[in-house]
Each structure stands twice: as structure tokens, then as C-alpha cells.
Amino acid sequence: MKHRILVVDDSLTIRNLLSMVLRQNGHDVVTAGDGFEGLQQLAAHRVDLIISDLNMPRMDGLSFIKKIRQNDSTSAIPVILLSTEKASRDIDNAMDAGASKYLVKPVLPAVLAAEVKKLLR
């Protein structure tokens, strides 16, 4: 069974790279450029996992996760938050907002694939 993963990042390059890695690992991928677009994709598609950037325009990753967790139909979807920020307070804020995992960019494809596999079990 293919899992569908939503990738949310304001960088088209990052979205394309993550999508390529995920597709190579047998997943379907939908993408969004920020949290608002991510919410629109969640309304249009059933997804099994979300990978989101932290720093994005319009709606950042923390606000996006909080919205996901407030909605009964999306509250149980695992979320991996990706960021270049590696301070412990950033990680704590992400986990407090409801992130399932926090990974610091750049993320090796094998590490991303392993974390995705763990969360989709």
C-alpha cells in the first residue's frame, strides 16, 4: 500500500528534493508552498504523514501544526518538522506544538526515509 505524504516548504527546490526521495521510497506525494496551502491540500487529499518546514511566509510550521492538531480529521497525522534552526528552544516549541519528529536541515535522504518509515508503522 502506498502512503501519501504532504510536503510543505516555501522552497520549490526543497519540495522537489523531498518529493524525489519520498517517491523513490514508494510514496505518493502532494506539495504545498506554505501552511495555508498545506491546509488546502489536507482538505483535498487524505494524507498519512506530513513533512513541513518551520520558517515559511503567511503561515509558519508551528502555526500549521497547531491548526492540524485542532482539527479532528487531521489531529492524528504524524508530522515531521524540518528546519535549519537547531536551538533546543526551537525543537521544544515544535514538539510542544505537536510535531512528531524534528529534523535539522540538511537531512540525509536515508535519515529522512528511516524516520518516515518509523512514523508510518
Image: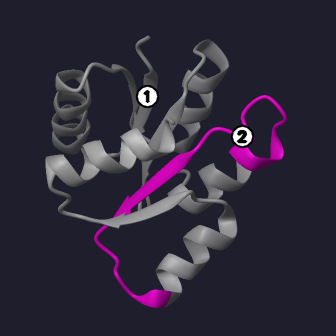
Callout 2: SS = loop
Q: Dot 2: within a 10 Å radius of its alpha carbon, few (fewer than 14), some, or many (20 or more) residues?
A: few
Q: State the residue at coordinates (17%, 28%).
A: 20
Q: Would you say residue 119 sits in the magenta stretch?
A: no
Is residue 1 toward the left or the right of residue 108 in the image? right
Are discs 1 and 2 less than 8 Å apart at CB? no
The mark total stands at: 2
Q: Which residue is mark 2?
A: 76
**In the rendered view, how is the structure colored?**
one colour
Q: Which quarter of the picture shows residue 75?
A: top right
Whether residue 108 is situated above or below residue 38 in the rendered picture: below
Whether residue 110 is situated above or below residue 106 in the rendered picture: above
Q: Earlier in the sequence, mark 1 or mark 2?
A: 1
Residue type pointed to by label 2: Ala
Q: Dot 1: within a 10 Å radius of its alpha carbon, few (fewer than 14), some, or many (20 or more) residues?
A: many
Number of the label disc, if any, that sits on residue 5: 1
Q: Position of residue 38 (x, y in %)?
A: 53, 34
Q: State the residue at coordinates (58%, 59%).
A: 99
Is residue 25 toward the left or the right of residue 37 in the image? left
Residue type pointed to by label 1: Ile
Is residue 17 toward the left or the right of residue 103 in the image? left
Range shown magenta: 68-88
Number of the label disc, if any, that sits on residue 89: none
Q: Position of residue 115 (x, y in %)?
A: 36, 50
